Amino acid sequence: MVASLEESCAKCESINASSGRTGSGSIGEDPALDQFMEAYCEMLIKYEQELTKPFKEAMLFFSRIECQLKALAVSSDFGDYP
């Protein structure tokens, strides 16, 4: 799902970055359509951010747990020595 959203966002960004479209019209000919497409692209970006937020939080959590486990392993290795 995220890959599909990223692809859609990339297409929107390329359309916004270009000066015109191949086909029957160009950007600026229909301001209502342009406004809709901008809002749609913004919505896709927010949707992608909401989808990836739990994943990023989980990765941060596991990273912290890994650091704590490493700290425990190191402290237990040195605990055997006087």
Image (spheres, rainbow, N blue to C red):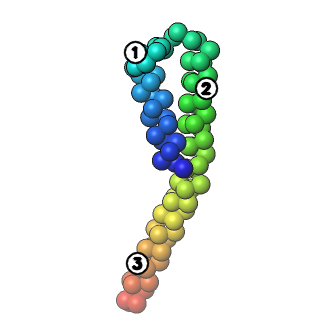
Disc assigned to residue 74: 3
Pinpoint residue 70: horizontal percent, then vertical percent: 43, 74
Residue 81 seen in this snapshot: yes
Q: Element type at marker 3?
A: helix
Q: Which residue lies under the disc numbered 1?
A: 19
Q: Give the residue displayed 56% in from the left and 43% down from the top.
A: 48
Question: Which of the two residues, 72 or 19, is positioned nearer the viewer here?
Answer: 19
Q: Which quadrant would residue 37 be assigned to in this image?
A: top right
Pinpoint residue 73: horizontal percent, then vertical percent: 43, 80
Q: Element type at marker 1?
A: loop
Task: List the single residue furthest toward the front.
Answer: 24
Q: What amino acid is found at the position of numbered circle 1 in the picture? A: Ser
Question: Which of the two residues, 27 or 13, is positioned nearer the viewer here?
Answer: 27
Disc assigned to residue 39: 2
- Mark 1 Cα-neighbour bin, 10 Å: few <14, some 14–19, many ≥20: few
Pinpoint residue 67: horizontal percent, then vertical percent: 46, 68
Question: Which of the two residues, 24 or 65, is positioned nearer the viewer here?
Answer: 24
On screen, residue 26 above or below 53: above
